[in-house]
Amino acid sequence: MLARSRCTKNGQEGSGPVVYWMSRDQRAADNWALLTAQQLAVERARPLVVLFALAPSYPLAAKRHYHFMLAGLRETAASLAKHGIPLVVLPGDPPAAVARWLAEQDACLVVHDFDPLRHKRAWVNAVAGCVAAPMLEVDAHNIVPCWLASPKLEYGAYTLRPKLQRLLPHYLTPFPPLRLHPVPAAAALGQPDWEWLEKTVVCPDQPGPVMDKRPGAGAGLEQLQSFLADKLPHYHESRNDPLKKVQSGLSPYLHFGQLSAQRAALAVLSAAPGGASTEAFLEELIIRRELSDNFCYYQPQYDTINCAPSWARDSLERHRSDPRPVLYSPAQLEAAQTADPLWNAAQTELTHSGAMPGYLRMYWAKRLLEWTERPEEAQRLALLFNDRYALDGRDPNGYAGVAWSLLGVHDRPWFERPIFGKIRYMNASGARKKFDVQRYIQETTQAFSSTPTALFPCDGPR
Ligand code: FAD
Ligand code: FO1
């Protein structure tokens, strides 16, 4: 188990409980960080407490995301309670609240989630700077711990794949169950007051919750089961056809850590050990997903144009002044008011349902390069819309997906053309070869009558 962890801070063990500071991996089952914390607590005959720092606001998160996360955390708290482990939710500035609580409890040691994102690393560093207890980081999100998979920024899937394939036999192993914790925690810790906690969040009301996506670990496992039963066999041939709906829909559960990617991989391998669909799905779930973490971990500029490889940066620079046939304002784009009905339909689906089919996400981002004055603006808007509306947004997969679409990250140079330079081009006639574009537009337009505009309600950025 300890092969998935590393020391982030040496320190003096306190007299209090072993603490697992949960953040990215918000589940009780199939969680290597929680299992590690339990093992360390059992060895020391200490209580185990799980801590969650509830930030009053989180970059670009809205009611849609907090609703999904808090409902999932309630379920996690109930599962933990059945194992004799309390979940303490601390509202307020995360590093300050966590550091204060650890000091008050004289924590024995702290186990925390690995997260490659800048602001999350800053939280951990701030806590490490002011607590006395030792801290241990566990990568409970990736199957192969990010820092062990590769020690450097990878060029693409083709360079990370062999490294992961070498290590997967050691890491893609079954999970031991979480045990009933033998040492009880202080009764005074009580149960979180969820209604009160919800009121401490000050995020925008719009976009609101997605009603047809049930949050939580149980719903994530059900979604996995229905994917295995109905969709996996068709994944290889139909995943790029939004009308066939054979993608798993697991990304929100994976993003909030309500489902473990390792659990999903094990379930797929047990349901369908071989074949093109299993291979195609595991390529996305393991290689592409872990490549995104590699990108954000080793590329501090993951959300700026400086993350582009040099061939792409030079090429975009050469085409910076190319005339754009049409420019749309952020408000027009957010309201899906372009002359491209396919793009409008994809944007409408995103804003209403918090999701967009994978193939369309690439097309959607790439068109922004043609409709904005500079690639920097295309990247800014792609991330802004993705992170504000997508249930799975604010994730390394999003930063890597946008950088792939607009900036050639993890891709190769293609034929030179206006505006795009050597960045891979996609257009509506390419989409028409993959699926019935007209039907997708019709179905989406019928399902969602208008496009909500939470970011740019009137023309011009707020
Ligand atoms: P499935 O096809 O069922 O795949 C299963 C899982 O594999 C996904 O849940 C995801 O964890 C992983 N995966 C699939 N495709 C990719 C990929 N291209 N890169 C990395 N991992 C992948 N994914 C997010 O999770 N959050 C985002 O904010 C996000 N933004 C994106 C923005 C753009 C512009 C692009 C091009 C891609 C983005 N992706 C993002 C990646 C991908 O489109 C989604 O993960 C996928 O469509 C989610 O649907 P699913 O769970 O049904 O995927
Ligand atoms: N993690 C936390 O530890 N505390 C939060 O308050 C919090 C809010 C939040 C809101 C939206 C969202 O998408 C994720 C959120 N996370 C939060 C989870 C976590 O930080 C992210 O999943 C990772 O950073 C993704 O790598």
Image (cartoon, helix red, strand yellow):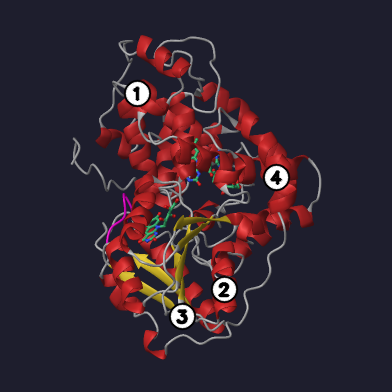
Q: Nearer the viewer, residue 262 or 71?
A: 262
Q: Please provide percent x and percent y for residue 183.
A: 54, 86
The residues tagged by marks 1 and 4 sit, at their Cα atoms, a distance apart of: 37 Å
Q: Earlier in the sequence, mark 1 or mark 3?
A: 3
Residue under the image location 52 percent in, 20 percent down: 424
Number of marks drawn: 4
Q: Is residue 35 left or right of residue 408?
A: right
The residues tagged by marks 2 and 1 sit, at their Cα atoms, a distance apart of: 47 Å
Q: Circle 2 sits on which residue?
A: 38
Q: Is residue 95 left or right of residue 215?
A: left
Label 1 crowd (10 A; few <14 / some 14-19 / many >=20): many
The residues tagged by marks 4 and 2 sit, at their Cα atoms, a distance apart of: 25 Å
Q: Is residue 248 above or below residue 242?
A: below
Could you tell me the amino acid type at mark 1?
Answer: Pro
Q: Is residue 93 left or right of residue 238?
A: left
Kindly give the residue lying farthest to the bottom in the view shown: 187
Could you tell me the amino acid type at mark 3?
Answer: Pro
Q: Which residues are magenta?
A: 55-62
Residue under the image location 31 percent in, 77 percent down: 104
Could you tell me the amino acid type at mark 4?
Answer: Leu
Kindly identify which numbered label has been placed on residue 167: 4
Kindly identify which numbered label has been placed on residue 375: 1
